[in-house]
Amino acid sequence: MIVQNRSPRLWAFALADYWLTIVILYVLWRSYKHVVQLRTQYQSSPKARPEQYAVLVRDIPQPPSGSISEEVDTFFRGIYPTSYESCVVVTDMSKSSKVWNEIETCRRKLAHSEAVYEISKKRPTHRTGKFGLYGPKVDSIDYYKEEMEKLEPMLKDEQRNANSKSQKGAAIVIFNSRVAATSASQAMHSEFANKWTTMAAPEPREVVWGNLPIPLVQRLARQFMVYVVVFLTIVFYMIPIAFISAIIALDNLEKKLTFLKPIVETPAVKAILQAYLPQLALIVFLALLPMLLLKLSTLEGIPAQSHIVRAAAGKYFYFNVFNVFLGVTLAGSLFNSLNAIIDDPKSIVSLLSKSLPLQATFFITFVALKFFVGYGLQLCRIVPLIIFHLKRKYLCKTDEEIRDAWAPGSFNYATCVPADMLILTITVCYSVIAPVVLAFAIVYFGLGWLLMRNQALNVMVPSWESGGRMWPHMHSRILAALFLSQLTMLGYFGVKEFVYVFLMIPPIIATLVFAYICRQLFYPSFSGSSMSAASKEAKEVPPTESVIEEYTPKCMVSSHGTKGTSDPEKHDENI
């Protein structure tokens, strides 16, 4: 039923908009407080973790004489004489990492070859060329043993060179108390912001070692360039898709790849290719997009894997909102609408208010399809199951290979969080105009809660733990969805010539004020640890040696396959 202009029924929409704002802000307030409490419990847990006693120091000035490790030791021992313990200076580990990876590959292949020999009682052989396609044929077991014997001395040489000649301007500084580490991570240690910058150390499992030595100015420049690339990708993503589609168009393929002409000219094959080749470009591009965004986020110089995932999730969310939500809402004329928005930015409100109701059926179907198909595939995990059985039958010979093939992995937050945020944005924006979407959203998030809770508790194995740092970003995007909905309703009432359209302004102001208050009140708790949480007594303070071992990359340990250094007197040496 279409509501006529100036109809008294518009009051129902206005009251619904107020009610939606009140409910969302109340739930977000309660949720934020609850997450802060959970994070505080996590940080003040009696079980001590290595990152609670470590601080990441970047932008270390190059000393006029001596090594960076000595400079760091002198600097922090002078400021924290009783609480400073040691430091792990970052070095150029590219060569040692390459050799370590070669040794690890040989070790796994040696174990595989020995397992094959145990099963078949025949000595396995292979060719030494690329992918085993050419070169002399050798005994696999003897070959990999000899390769490891050659590579082990090379690894030790590269480790010594890295420790003595390749120190970089970043370090992990170790303290003997959580309070001292928390205080140091939040303090300003130089009069200049680009020297001796400190932050809470990432969890050892998620440290991105290559990004730690990047200077502040270079990080800012990288961030700016990445944002430009992401903006162009979001706004003009159809250009590369159209370019690829043109290249793989059937006529072009026939001209460039003449040997395919007999196959392409077959009527059945030609009909299928004409129908699906253009869509193939879109599918491939969208599949590669999360990997591209993760790579771009890494190039920003972010030191922690969890932060990279959060940054990529944010970029993917903006892409979804602009190209999926707004693109479909504006009925395929996004570029024409974009020109109108650039000429008159205020026109976006009227464009949305006119276009949003027309696409209600599409988005309701979209939400329904997401929980029927998406959660169905997530629940049965049929693809990982098939891959596991194929690997186990044809590739896996050792217990380690079977464990790796069976490993379920961790949540892909970079894609699943933006997908859920898109559904939430659709639900919030249509909850007043087309309330039936709420029924489908309840089913979607209800099933999601049951399924993802089971996956988190019984299936997935996390690669790292960030202590709930994803929540502030989700909170801000929920508010962005609410703000978009309120702007749309403001335009909707304007189009409907509602006399009291000015009454739609207070919810917008309330949302902006609420966002500011939450930012000031809660967000600082997620940028680090509070002193009150850090002051809680731990059951057992980890020894400095164990913390250093945790922050020692595998390629820099004294012997391959073990974690940490074998000589206790060398724990203060840099990485």
Image: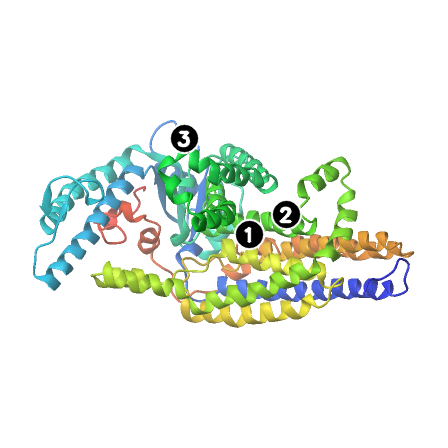
Q: Please name which of the two marks, 3 or 2, marks the residue nearer to the observer.
A: 2
Q: Callout 2, which amino acid? A: Phe
Determine which residue is flagged by label 2: 322
Q: Is residue 379 visible?
A: yes
Which quadrant of the figure has residue 442?
Answer: bottom right
In this figure, which residue is indicated by the disc labeled 1?
Answer: 527
Coloring scheme used: rainbow
Q: Distance between the residues labelled 2 and 1?
A: 29 Å
Q: Residue 253 carries which label?
A: none
Q: Which of marks 3 and 1 is in front?
A: 1
Of the image marks 3 and 2, the number of the one nearer the N terminus = 3
Q: In this view, does 449 lie to the left or right of 441?
A: left
Residue at image position (49%, 41%) is 296
Q: Which badge, 2 or 1, is on the more N-terminal residue? A: 2
Give the spatial CA distance, label 3 vs label 2.
45 Å
80 above or below 398? above
Where is mark 3, residue-wise?
62
Q: Is residue 60 visible?
A: no
Q: Is mark 1 on a helix, strand or loop?
A: helix
Residue 406 in the image: state x and y as whole percent.
Answer: 32, 64
Sequence order check, earlier mark of 3 and 1: 3
The residue type indicated by label 1 comes to Ser
